[in-house]
């Protein structure tokens, strides 16, 4: 599958030996992992660290200052001030989901390249806005679904294209975890260390609730996008990539919130099936609160073909014929410990600098410096992100969806299309992008 954003669209290519100044936004967990990877890279400089939590912001500034000998980063709470800084070449966005697209568009309008963590959007409309903005401003926009840069996954997709398992027609992926209850939240004053107004950013204002921050916002429609976007997106993207399909024609979802009676608004159990025009199907099974593994994996992907099947995850891929005999296997030369990103990398020695982060980030910086083709360009990955949104809409409305496979938009259901976008806090709308 080709990536539509070609090197020719990237404006202001930076020289091979020119230092790239970056700003990191949202640095508690995922952002911390990205920081630890960047510090180990040549000709990069973390110039700004942005977070709305003062304790986290101060901790990251201190950590980077000890490790990054080149300079001490500036601390900033307000992302809008980050994009005004003309010394910044690229921004990394790992703040909550509801900020991803508005921040990415603001960054491009400020002449910055963008690395945006998945999901790239909070709703389907934002994906359209982000693609339009990338085309308008011509910036490099890499989406943080790192398995697109895994050598084993790249090879698996190449082998599939060359017919190793015949004609591929179906794919299945899964995610299993043991998440606990988030309880019933209470409206309380926001803690002193948190700028609650800036944390809400583009979202319409709500009172602070004591079970939102730091992580449980994922399970509220107002801020998050559910488990299918939080974890399912990674493997659904691999399925779509391997099958070589675009938008589906039908989406079905079953599931619910079964484990706990609490404030969690999405689904701890969900199965989403996607049908395609060329008789191909993709299915995702999500079990947020039941950690039973499939094929000894908490997450993974199977691709089915007429001559065999492929099982792959982030560390390896295995090809089998129809008699279940192994015909090929390939393992990553350096793998992350199961279920963690906290062990030191063998390559850099830095905690958090796991190989997929490094591969993916090298690809991003290669696109900025040399015009390299992105492994995870926004116009392609948006099709995978949209799959997740459509699964949530189908589940929320408890109805199958019919999709225009040219545009990805829902056909014949005006009520479902009311969930295509969202309202924004005045002054924070992602505007000027089309």
Image: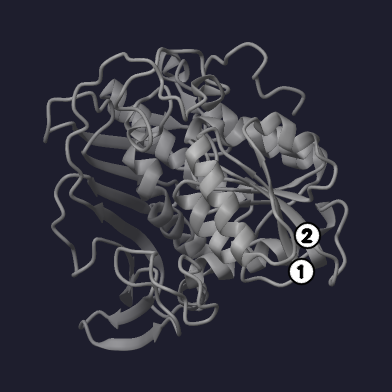
Q: Is label 1 in contact with label 2 (beta carbons under 8 Å)?
A: yes
In this image, 78 relative to 411: left or right?
right
Q: Residue at x 47, y 82 (%)?
A: 346
- Percent x, y for residue 321? 28, 82
Q: Residues within 10 Å of mark 2 (few under 14, many from 20)?
A: many
Q: Which residue is mark 1?
A: 43
Mark closer to the chain start, 1 or 2: 2
* Quadrant where the image shows the C terminus: top right
Q: Looking at the image, which is closer to me, 228 or 369? A: 369
Q: Which residue is mark 2?
A: 20
Q: Residue at x 47, y 64 (%)?
A: 147
Q: Secondary structure at mark 2?
A: strand
Is residue 337 placed above or below 259 in the rendered structure? below
Q: Secondary structure at mark 1?
A: loop
Q: Looking at the image, which is closer to me, 225 or 26? A: 26
Is any part of residue 94 visible from this angle? no
Q: Residue at x 13, y 57 (%)?
A: 292
Q: Looking at the image, which is closer to me, 258 or 357? A: 357
């Amino acid at each position: 599958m080709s990536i539509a954003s070609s090197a020719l669209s990237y404006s202001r290519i930076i020289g091979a030996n020119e230092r790239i100044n970056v700003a990191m936004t949202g640095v508690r967990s995922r952002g911390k992992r990205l920081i630890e990877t960047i510090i180990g890279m040549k000709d990069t400089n973390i110039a700004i660290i942005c977070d709305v939590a003062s304790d986290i912001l101060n901790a990251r500034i201190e950590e980077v200052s000890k490790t990054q000998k080149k300079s001490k980063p500036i601390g900033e709470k307000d992302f809008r001030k980050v994009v005004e800084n003309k010394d910044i070449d690229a921004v990394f966005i790992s703040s909550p989901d509801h900020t991803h697209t508005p921040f990415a568009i603001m960054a491009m309008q400020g002449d910055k390249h963008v690395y945006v963590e998945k999901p790239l959007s909070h709703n389907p409309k934002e994906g359209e806005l982000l693609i339009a903005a990338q085309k308008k401003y011509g910036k490099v926009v890499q989406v943080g679904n790192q398995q697109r840069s895994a050598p084993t996954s790249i090879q698996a997709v190449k082998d599939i294209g060359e017919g190793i398992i015949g004609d591929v027609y179906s794919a299945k992926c899964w995610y299993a975890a043991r998440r606990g209850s988030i309880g019933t939240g209470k409206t309380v004053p926001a803690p002193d260390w948190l700028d609650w107004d800036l944390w809400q950013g583009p979202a319409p204002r709500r009172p602070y609730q004591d079970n939102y921050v730091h992580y449980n916002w994922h399970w509220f429609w107002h801020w998050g996008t559910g488990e299918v976007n939080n974890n399912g997106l990674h493997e659904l993207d691999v399925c779509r990539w391997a099958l070589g399909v675009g938008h589906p024609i039908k989406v079905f979802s079953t599931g619910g919130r079964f484990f706990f009676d609490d404030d969690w608004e999405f689904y701890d159990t969900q199965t989403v099936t996607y049908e395609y025009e060329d008789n191909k199907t993709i299915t995702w099974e999500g079990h947020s609160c039941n950690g039973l593994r499939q094929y000894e994996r908490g997450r993974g992907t199977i691709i089915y073909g007429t001559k065999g099947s492929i099982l792959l995850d982030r560390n390896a891929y295995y090809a089998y014929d129809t008699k279940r005999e192994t015909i090929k296997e390939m393992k990553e030369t350096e793998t992350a410990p199961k279920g963690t990103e906290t062990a030191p990398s063998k390559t850099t020695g830095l905690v958090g600098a796991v190989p997929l982060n490094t591969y993916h980030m090298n690809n991003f910086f290669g696109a900025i410096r040399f015009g390299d083709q992105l492994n995870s360009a926004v116009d392609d990955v948006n099709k995978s992100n949209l799959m997740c949104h459509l699964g949530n809409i189908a589940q929320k409305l408890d109805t199958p969806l019919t999709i225009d496979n040219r545009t990805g938009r829902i056909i014949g259901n005006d009520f479902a299309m009311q969930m295509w976008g969202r309202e924004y806090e005045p002054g924070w709308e992602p505007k000027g992008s089309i």
